[in-house]
Image (spheres, rainbow, N blue to C red):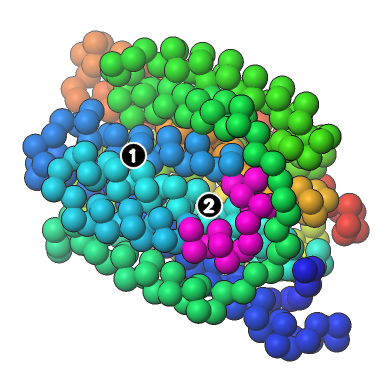
């Protein structure tokens, strides 16, 4: 079934009002559900000290709550391209929200670390399916000339949910037991699941696709090893039971084998993840830029709270609330940026967006032990403006440049890129920070000034990487089914 509509208007003459209302309901249900599951992805970072105390665990053991989540996402997302073609919309949604809700219940009732990690793995399995499902559905239902407006709403999910996760976590931990992070989310997940069961309709046509049993383990081992290697660098500061280069090398080699097999199977329609998407230049440039954006976003989410708490002496709740304006600004800007994309195209948005991101990172590289809080907020707001100008045009250009039969695979590629790039950003920023802080400490600096020096070095490295974002922006184009950028 192929239906097109403008989700905010019923004015199109060729779309029946009841069909438009049905499709609008589908998209908003998916948006709310996706926001809920993505918000959960970054909610654990601030809670780690409390969990270490309550469960009697070490920091390295507690980091598995985040690492296991990232690993599961990296393993499951590449498979969603196949699932979205093989199963109906309603089936995938019920599977995703059912797993997420069940995992949330496991976490809320967990007596110890093992069950809590198991719950996070189940949660991540459902989360991994939701974003590709949302993006594929939007691309199938919304016509090219109005996609920017709807993709702007998706950008709220992508950018704001991870940004405000630590803030919400800090508020909950300041007032309630850590289990309420899950008890408060569970009713939302169950309500979405019930609404989807009774009201969600199928808007795709499932096709019989053979599952290549060799590609599945290659994907799981390759992406899992790569993200694990990056996570051991970033989250354990290089002090991991396994040297990071080992899983990183394994991941790169196995992913190369996986890619070779997908390219071989694609002409037969048997690829688990169809990599012919990279044959489109608009898609490839947009994916590379999205990866750089996610590196900046997740690197910043990790480094700024460390700086605020360990250098400026702020409480976790204060640090979380200080980052809230930037996250909310990204959300407020997203719909406007989407409408601008529909009018003027991608390049006029992503070029200034790249400059804003770079400016924000370079300004953060000037932070020191005596920096005023307002200066930190200005830096964060500038970076947030840049990311807001980038997310919607990049998502829309990337997927809009593909033929319809590759939407699901393109969504899976974007989701995988976000996970790998996010882990890489954390690894890069934290590793540089740790090395620079250690060097400053060996030179006689105290802990506070050494940490500040490390943070500056981390953001300076991010600023250097962001220069590639500016250059790439000049190569972004609007998809061929819309008129070319001026």
Is 373 placed left or right of 309 in the picture? right
What secondary structure predominates along the stretch shown in magenta? helix
Quadrant where the N terminus sits is bottom right
Mark 2 falls on what kind of element? Answer: helix
The percent position of residue 190, horizontal first and vertical second, equals: 37, 69
Residue at the spot x=29%, y=34% of the render? Answer: 64
Sequence-wise, the earlier of marks 1 and 2 is 1
Mark 1 falls on what kind of element? Answer: helix
Residue numbers of the magenta segment: 80-95
Residue 354 visible in the snapshot: no
Q: Which of 252 and 377 is in front in this view?
A: 252
Q: Distance between the residues labelled 1 and 2?
A: 18 Å
- Asked if the residue under mark 2 is in contact with the one under mark 1, i.e. CB atoms within 8 Å, the reply is no
Above or below residue 211? Residue 483 is below
Badge number at residue 324: none
Residue where numbered disc 2 is placed: 129
The percent position of residue 469, horizontal first and vertical second, equals: 65, 36
Residue 203, magenta (yes or no): no
Q: Which of 191 and 461 is in front in this view?
A: 191
Residue at the spot x=57%, y=74% of the render? Answer: 200
The percent position of residue 98, horizontal first and vertical second, equals: 42, 61
Local crowd size for mark 2, using a 10 Å CA cut-off: few (<14), some (14–19), many (≥20):
many
Above or below residue 157? Residue 285 is above
Local crowd size for mark 1, using a 10 Å CA cut-off: few (<14), some (14–19), many (≥20):
many
Badge number at residue 66: 1
Quadrant where the C terminus sits is bottom right
Is 52 placed left or right of 162 in the picture? left
Q: Which of 220 and 29 is in front in this view?
A: 220
Location of residue 287 by image quarter: top right
The percent position of residue 352, horizontal first and vertical second, equals: 68, 48
Residue 420 visible in the snapshot: yes
């Amino acid at each position: 079934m192929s239906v097109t509509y403008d989700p905010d208007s019923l004015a199109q003459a060729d779309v029946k009002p009841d069909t438009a209302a049905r499709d609008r309901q589908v998209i908003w249900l998916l948006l709310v559900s996706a926001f809920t599951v993505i918000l959960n992805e970054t909610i654990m970072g601030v809670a780690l000290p409390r969990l270490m105390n309550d469960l009697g665990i070490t920091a390295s053991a507690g980091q598995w709550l985040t690492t296991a989540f990232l690993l599961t996402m990296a393993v499951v997302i590449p498979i969603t391209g196949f699932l979205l073609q093989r199963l109906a919309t309603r089936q995938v949604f019920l599977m995703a929200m059912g797993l997420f809700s069940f995992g949330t219940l496991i976490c809320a009732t967990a007596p110890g670390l093992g069950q809590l990690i198991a719950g996070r793995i189940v949660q991540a399995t459902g989360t991994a399916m939701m974003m590709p499902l949302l993006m594929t559905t939007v691309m199938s239902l919304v016509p090219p000339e109005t996609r920017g407006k709807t993709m702007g709403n998706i950008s709220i999910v992508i950018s704001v949910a991870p940004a405000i996760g630590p803030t919400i976590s800090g508020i909950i931990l300041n007032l309630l037991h850590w289990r309420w992070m899950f008890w408060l989310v569970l009713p939302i997940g169950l309500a979405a699941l019930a609404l989807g069961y009774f009201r969600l309709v199928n808007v795709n046509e499932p096709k019989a696709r053979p599952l290549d049993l060799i590609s599945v383990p290659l994907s799981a081992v390759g992406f899992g090893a790569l993200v694990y290697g990056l996570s051991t660098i970033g989250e354990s500061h290089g002090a991991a039971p396994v040297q990071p280069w080992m899983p990183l090398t394994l991941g790169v080699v196995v992913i190369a084998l996986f890619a070779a097999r997908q390219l071989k199977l694609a002409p037969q329609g048997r690829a688990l993840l169809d990599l012919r998407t990279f044959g489109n230049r608009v898609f490839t440039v947009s994916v590379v830029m999205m990866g750089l954006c996610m590196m900046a976003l997740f690197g910043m989410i990790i480094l700024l709270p460390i700086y605020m708490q360990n250098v400026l002496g702020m409480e976790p709740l204060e640090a979380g609330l200080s980052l809230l304006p930037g996250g909310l600004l990204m959300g407020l800007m997203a719909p406007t940026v989407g409408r601008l994309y529909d009018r003027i195209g991608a390049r006029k948005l992503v070029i200034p967006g790249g400059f804003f991101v770079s400016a924000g990172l370079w300004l953060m590289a000037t932070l020191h032990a005596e920096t005023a809080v307002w200066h930190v907020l200005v830096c964060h707001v500038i970076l947030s403006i840049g990311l807001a100008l980038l997310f919607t045009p990049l998502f829309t250009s990337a997927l809009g440049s593909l033929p319809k039969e590759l939407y699901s695979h393109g969504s899976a590629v974007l989701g995988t890129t976000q996970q790998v790039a996010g882990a890489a950003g954390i690894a890069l920023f934290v590793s540089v920070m740790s090395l620079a802080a250690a060097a400053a400490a060996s030179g006689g600096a105290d802990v506070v000034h050494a940490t500040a020096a490390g943070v500056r070095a981390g953001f300076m490295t991010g600023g250097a990487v962001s220069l590639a974002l500016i250059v790439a922006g000049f190569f972004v184009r609007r998809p061929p089914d819309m008129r070319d950028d001026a």
